[in-house]
Every structure is written in C-alpha cells, then in structure tokens.
Image: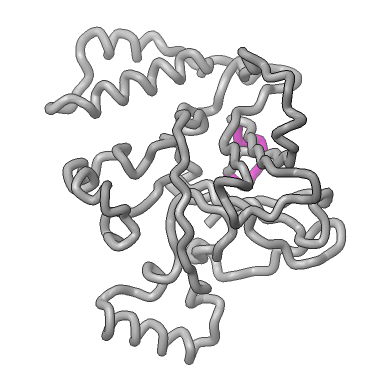
C-alpha cells in the first residue's frame, strides 16, 4: 500500500484500540475499503528510519573512532527469502550532521503497515543478561532449567534474556538452535549490535515488564498494541530481527538474522 494509506490504517487501528468497545465505525470501514493495493515501485526505494541512538544515551554502544551516533534504517519490503526487511547501518558524528532535511525522502509504497515504525522516544535501561540455555551442553542446560523452576518458578530461558529493542546482549535462540555467524569479510565471529523486536515484553513473562507499565499491560490483555508495542512494528510472526556486526572492523558488512 502507499505510505500515506499505511499511516491512515495505523490511525484507524489506534482509534479503534482506544475505544471502550472494539470495532470500526462506519466511516472507518469506508476508509479501509478504499485502501488499494499498489505495485512495487520501480527503481530505488527510500528506506525508513528504525533507530537513532546516541552514545551519550546508550553506554553499551561501541562506536568506531570519531562517531557518536548510530542510525539504522530498513527497506519496508521483503525482497529476500529471509522474511525480513533489509537493513542499513550508519555510524556518524552528530556534530558533523548540519544539513538536516525538514522533509526526508519516503518510499512511495510499503509492503505492510507493520514495517512502518511509529515514532517514539527511548528510555534506555542497563540490565544483566546471561546466555540462552541452548548455548550450553545438555547436562548444564538441564541443571539450569531445574534451578530456575525450583527456585524461581520460571523457565531459565525466560529469565536470562531481556525481550524488546536492545543494544548488545545475548540472542534469545528458539526458532533455531545456535549457529555461527562469521563476518563475510574476515570470518571473525560477529556480535549482536541491535535487536529490533516486535514487542518490548510478553504479558506471560511478568518480570520483564517495567513497573510503571504493569497495570496498563494488564488492562490491555491479549490485544495487539498497547504499551508493549510503542513502535507498532512486527517482524514476520512477531519475531525479532537481529543485526550482527564484525568486532574487527565497522567497515565490514553487517549481517541480519531472525529469532
């Protein structure tokens, strides 16, 4: 659909969710019926911004020399078989960004409204994570799972890794077993730079919900959206897209994977 109609659909969805009784109004249904499919544009397609992070706000970022700003964009189409939008990563110096466009270029069309991030502010918080149990041998994995259930009443996998958008940290394996992701240029093991998640937390894993959002999350229940989905994006079937980079050189191409 066109980007303008994608944003119209987003506004209608938000209005529907804000009402006490769910269901589109007659006017909203008429607007939705007028949204038409459009052809994929030919030629270059402008990318959409996904994240803009300053080193001063996110201490976990490890920028190349002279950079203090990370910008991540993606193409709002699935052109490849991996089921994810193609991403672009830019390290910049904020002081050198002087010619700021008031109206940045935008794509003429998007694959889906869930590939159009809703603008929002970040509130970064540092947390300690531990590797997924799938990264250990069978004996250690069974010991960890027994300890977490017996002592805390929660599965280790849900305890050790934070959900949501994050810088660095560990990968929440589960869609696949852990597998190597070497740098395509030098072969060094790549490291997670940014996880682009479809939701900031899951209601059934209560301890990762920020205290100030726990009451609101209970009020929303199972409805898509709410405080757990401020960006309103969805990667594949509510999965996460993980950007991995080479620790040896920021100039080597990044790779992306889904979990």
- Can you say whether 17 is above or below 186 in the image? above
Count the numbered circles shown. 0
Most foreground residue, 164 or 58: 58
Q: Position of residue 144 (x, y in %)?
A: 41, 84
Farthest-out residue, right: 186
Q: Position of residue 180 (x, y in %)?
A: 69, 68
Nearer the observer, 29 or 45: 45
Image point (52%, 17%), residue name: 3
- Where is residue 160? Give x, y as percent: 43, 71
Check the image and name the residue furthest to the bottom: 139
- Which residues, given as a range, are shown in magenta? 77-83
Residue 26 placement: quadrant: top left
Image-based side of 190 in relation to 175, left or right: right
Q: Residue 22's image quarter?
A: top left
Q: What residue lies at 70% left-to-right and 43% top-to-bottom? A: 68
- Magenta segment includes 168: no
Image height of 53 relative to 8, above or below: below
Left or right side of 242 for 219:
left
On the rendered structure, is 253 left or right of 134?
Answer: right
Q: Residue at x 46, y 35 (%)?
A: 121
User: Do we see residue 105 in this rendering?
Assistant: no
Q: Position of residue 182 (x, y in %)?
A: 76, 64
At x 27%, y 13%, the residue is 29
In the displayed structure image, the side of residue 219 where residue 14 appears, left or right:
right
Residue 104 seen in render: yes
Q: Is residue 190 above or below residue 102?
A: below
Tell me, what colour scheme is on the image?
one colour
- Decide whether the magenta segment is chiefly helix, strand or loop: loop
């Amino acid at each position: 659909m066109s980007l303008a109609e994608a944003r119209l659909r987003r506004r209608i969805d938000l209005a529907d969710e804000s009402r006490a009784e769910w269901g589109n109004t007659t006017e909203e249904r008429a607007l939705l019926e007028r949204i038409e499919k459009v052809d994929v544009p030919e030629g270059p397609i402008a990318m959409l911004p996904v994240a803009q992070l300053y080193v001063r706000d996110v201490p976990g970022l490890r920028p190349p020399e002279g950079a203090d700003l990370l910008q991540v964009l993606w193409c709002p189409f699935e052109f490849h078989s991996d089921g994810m939008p193609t991403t672009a990563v830019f390290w910049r110096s904020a002081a050198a960004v002087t010619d700021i466009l008031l109206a940045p270029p935008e794509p003429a069309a998007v694959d889906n409204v869930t590939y159009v991030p809703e603008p929002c502010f970040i509130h970064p918080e540092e947390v300690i994570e531990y590797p997924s149990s799938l990264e250990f041998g069978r004996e250690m994995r069974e010991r960890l799972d027994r300890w977490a259930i017996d002592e805390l009443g929660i599965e280790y996998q849900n305890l050790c890794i934070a959900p949501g958008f994050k810088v660095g940290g560990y990968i929440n394996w589960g869609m696949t077993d852990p597998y190597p992701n070497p740098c395509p240029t030098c072969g060094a093991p790549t490291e997670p730079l940014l996880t682009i998640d479809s939701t900031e937390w899951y209601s059934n894993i209560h301890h990762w919900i920020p205290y100030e959002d726990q009451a609101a999350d209970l009020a929303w229940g199972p409805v898509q959206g709410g405080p757990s989905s401020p960006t309103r994006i969805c990667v594949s079937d509510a999965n996460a897209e993980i950007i991995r980079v080479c620790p040896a050189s920021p100039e080597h191409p990044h790779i992306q994977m889904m979990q």
